[in-house]
Image (tube, rainbow, N blue to C red):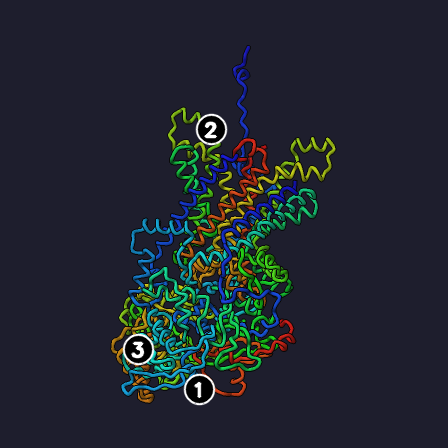
Amino acid sequence: MKMKKVLSLLLISCLLLGIIAGCSPAKESGGTESEAPKAGEKDDMMSIIRMTQDWPTYIDPAVGSSFSCTISLINLYDPLVFPQTDGTVAPHIAKDWTVSDDGLKYTFEIRDDIKFHTGNLMKASDVAFSMNRMLDIGEGYAYLYKGVVKEAIALDDTTVEMILEKPFGPFIDTLVRFMVLEEDVVMANLDKSVSTYGEYGDYGKQWLLTHDAGSGPYFAKDVKLEEYVLGEWFPDHFLGWEEDAPKYFKISAATEPVSVRTAMANRELEITDEIQPLENYNTMAKFDGVDIIAYESGTNMNLCLNTKKAPTDDVHFRKAIAHALDYDVVQNNIYPDSVRPRGPVPRIVPGSNLDMPIYDFNLDKAREELSKSKYADNPEMWAIDMSWCAEVPEQEKIALLLQANLAEIGIDMEITKNPFGAMIADAQTIETTPHASLVNVAPSYFEAGSMIKTRYHSSSTGSWEQMEWVQDPELDAMIDDALATTDRDERFKKYNEIQLYINDLCPTVWVFEWVEKRACQTGYVDWQPYLLLQKGEKFVYPMGYSLYVRNMKVYPDKRAEFSQAK
Amino acid sequence: MINENQAMPQRIVIERDKYEKYKKAWYKFSLNKMSVVGLIIVMAVLVLGVFQPVIAPFPHHAGKFVNYNDASLAPNSTYLLGTDIFGRDILSRILFAFRGALTMGIGVLLIVVPIGGVLGLIAGYWRGKPISIFIMRITDIFLALPPLILALCVGAILRPTLFNSMVAICVSWWPWYTRLVYGMVTTLRNELYVKSAELLGASKAHILFKEILPNCLGPIFTKMTLDMGWVILTGASLSFVGLGEQPPTPALGTMVSDGAKFLPAQWWIAIFPAISIMLIVLGFNLTGDGIKDMFSSEE
Amino acid sequence: MIINLIRKIGIYFLVLIGLSILVFTIGRVIPGDPARQALGPRAPEQVVQALKEEMHLDKPYYIQYGIWLKGALRFDLGKSLMTRRPVIQDIREFLPATLEIVGISALLMALGGIILGVLATKYEGTWLDGIIRMFSYLGVASPAFVWAIIFMLIFGYALPLLPTTGRIGFATTAPPHATGMYTLDYLLNGDIQGFKEAFSHLLLPAIALMLGGMSQAARITRSSMTDNSVKDYILAEQAYGVTERKILLKYLLRPSIIPTISILSLDIAALFGNAFLVEQIFNYPGLSRYGMQAMLNKDLNAISAVVMILGIVFILVNILIDIIVAYVDPRVRLMGGDSQ
């Protein structure tokens, strides 16, 4: 009888399987390759750099702008200019460029030897197409170019002209975020069944979720949404290859501390993400051959206060909050190695005002500010809600610290743990944006203007990069004026004034300047930040560029020598 | 000659112990030693939860408090179960979390049992009529989903608070009582005493609540006791995912999920809350078994 | 009996419709502009308008429901906000993963529970019985995620025998997509190494999931078998001289299994629910984890789709259990009704 029972169970399993197999016709689920290698073929795959980074990751240059997106983008595509470790930019796709006298016309001469992953040569028309596509779609880094670039025109096969609406000083700096796609490939993969972009259908967004149309050192071999991006090296990349450069890179979404730690111990992961809890870094530092590498990245941790929602709409109330946070505890216990911030622009970003007054931890001053606010006589109004990003567990420590600190001066703060996707959704209207939100912001290009405009210009309200809703016409005018100034020194002088203005407005509590920490298998991987730190050299990387895999080296033989760490 | 006193037999009055009924119940309950153990656990949880401010060594750690100097300490003489990454005493927080758990269990059952029960009574008594079919179909729809999922769904849509997670669990829990009572009522409505009540012209309310309901109480109470454990478990699952009480209020599920990140090095942060959950559910399960014995028919 | 089954399927179908209405209503209750959310705050207004019209957000609710239903029948369930692609594709990828785990879990649960129950009955009163009973108490009382945590602790650190994250190792690539279940796909591809690896990744989550249900199945099997073992017909069999073993397995087991199987259907349902938590801990990319992310990110289309799919799968499982019960319980077959 038991036999029959087992048999019937087996039969049912086969039934279920049959149903499922029938429902899913064999279709490619991602990746440009038609055949994935078998699990046994691992030899070449050992020359790989594996990283973890939190999702979502959009590898479409016109859509992605978060940390994980930028890492994929700089490896799969090539930008027009490439940032150097001293903060300047150097020619990359663009060989040379000239600016017209009125600052409105930029003419770029591009290289004629750049091949796309399909083998075709890059033409100026591809560059123009990519810029126009970015402007039309309006997502990701488009905010850098919207209102700035009117259009891009290809004059011949190697010359591109970009016409600006008004002069924009740091325009060249912004082009590190401009990636070039192959026009023919995108046009061949449009989804014409939708008409979001008129005759362009969906502009290829669907296809570009899991494929690339780029020329970068790696091509997207396999993309499994919510899981990983696997890139394989592109031998014909125009810059050539050095020995021992990694042949593969993989970015996984598995940022849970336990899996990261286990993977590092088993040498299944080369570089971790930067949002691990402190305790995890300490544990991993003890592993043989693993080092924790920390460097300033020009990112600061902001507590964005909603300036259009009571009670944080009152400047004195906000200043009270700024005086109520115990910054020393943050720097000593929560984020050791972090730097005390001075206003909106981190100190290593060119253009930062180094002479700014700071809000120190002083409960008496806090109470004084409270009494000056218009809610001084209504203590029942002293209640605010705050969100922190669920993917960064360390933020909870700051949230609870602030809650305890604020309780001492009578402000009641309610905390919500929000996944980043939900924070992005909340940021879209004034009513749904919380009174306070904890967010890390990095400059899109390495100049103070980037931080200032992204964070405080009214054009960025509604996005996660500005949850303050500042919308101050005077400030907007100052920022626009500064950005239009083509002379660098002039521009920086204007930046200083703007930073003082913002500091006084106190729309944000600047918690600390972040020192980005990652664990790396330095025993068998050569990674620039580690090497430069060893030499004592200073360096800066715009977000994502520190993980340019082409510049790394990996030694699979050495990896085999390392046993599993405890 | 007949003596008047002798002709009528004396009425013999047997002195009944006022508490005989309860003693009998207790005897049946305590037949199974494990049930008594369960009861002890449940009582302990109740007492600890209610008297937490007095018993706990650091009751304010369950509120707005951080102390990063004492963070992540292993169990020692000051902090009996260690501290978490914010420097808060885990023992005090677990005791405080009992409150939330018990509130959730009692609150949910207080809502779900009357509503589900009444619906089941109606559906069972008027079986075959449209109202009954309607009620049971709705019940089927709600039961078509695995219970946790509906609760997660509703909980995710509402803002995460204790009250909302209770609402989420209520939404997915009531059908079970409807079904339970429905099953019992359909059998009982054909009993002789029900038929005679109907014949005598008793009102429907009387029949439902005075005749049928008292005979259903046994399984209902058993299920309620068992459910206390399950509701607390579901609540812990919800808060594990983040849909319950928000920090700094401690919740058992949240403590487990927070602590899971720090296994195995700082194991105490996750393991002690996890064991507490197990103990609570175990306690209610064992007690439920005893209650079932208590209501079992006299042999 | 067939008629009864068809009647039941009809009821289930109605239940599905009701479920879809419930799910749809919940989905539309959340505030916010789905079109704006999908495209981001800096997208040009006319693009948002175009998407709104495409998503039919400007029409009244019942028309929206009708359109959604029509789409659902064609397997078009809208786009996910998180992955930016049609939900049906996400489901195609993640559902088999969860089915793999739940399938193995259900199998282990049923077999394990029944075997343990039989053993406990055979050795009733001995220490083995005591151990099994104690274990089943604990098993029922512990939520799946507690077991998951304990396993993480043991296998992630102390005894690294089994992998604790993902479906395959960091270094491996997935097999070509045939059924979506890695174990089967590797087999179909002739890749034994891959199959072993995928299977080993399945074990811990599956075992963590099934322990609760297995304990309950063991308990019920045991109690129902001991209840039946004092019945007259068993006594008659013993008098006839039938061997102990045959009595146990042939005459005792079959009627005692019925309540177990009924409970099993509930427990398998619970597996789907608990899979949410276990997949989270083991970082296993299945439908439950996807649904969890969808709920936390308020991704309406994904939530509706996941809930509907789970409802459908659960109903299918119920139908299967009904068939099994009918097969095993002659009363059902002969009377053409429920065995209650």
- Local crowd at mark 1 within 10 Å, few (<14), some, or many (≥20)? few
Decide: is A280 above or below B133. below
Answer yes or no: do the residues labelled 2 and 1 have beta carbons within 8 Å? Answer: no
Depth check: give the residue in front, C136 or B141: B141
**Residue at left offset 68%, top offset 39%:** C248
Amino acid type at image mark 2: Asn
Subunit that carries the residue with mark 3? A
- Residue underneath mark 1: A86
Subunit that carries the residue with mark 1? A
Element marked by disc 3: loop
- Residue underneath mark 2: B190
Amino acid type at image mark 1: Asp
Element marked by disc 2: loop
Residue A429, image quadrant: bottom left
Depth check: give the residue in front, A53 or C138: A53
Answer yes or no: do the residues labelled 1 and 3 have beta carbons within 8 Å? Answer: no
> Which one is closest to the eye, mark 1 or mark 3?
3
Which percent across, then down, holds residue C183?
A: 58, 57
Which residue is outermost to the top? B1
Depth check: give the residue in front, A52 or B203: A52
Which percent across, then down, holds residue C113?
A: 62, 47
- Residue underneath mark 3: A148
Q: Measure the alpha-carbon separation of dots 1 and 3.
A: 26 Å
Q: Measure the alpha-carbon separation of dots 2 and 3.
A: 83 Å
Q: Are marks 1 and 3 on the same chain?
A: yes
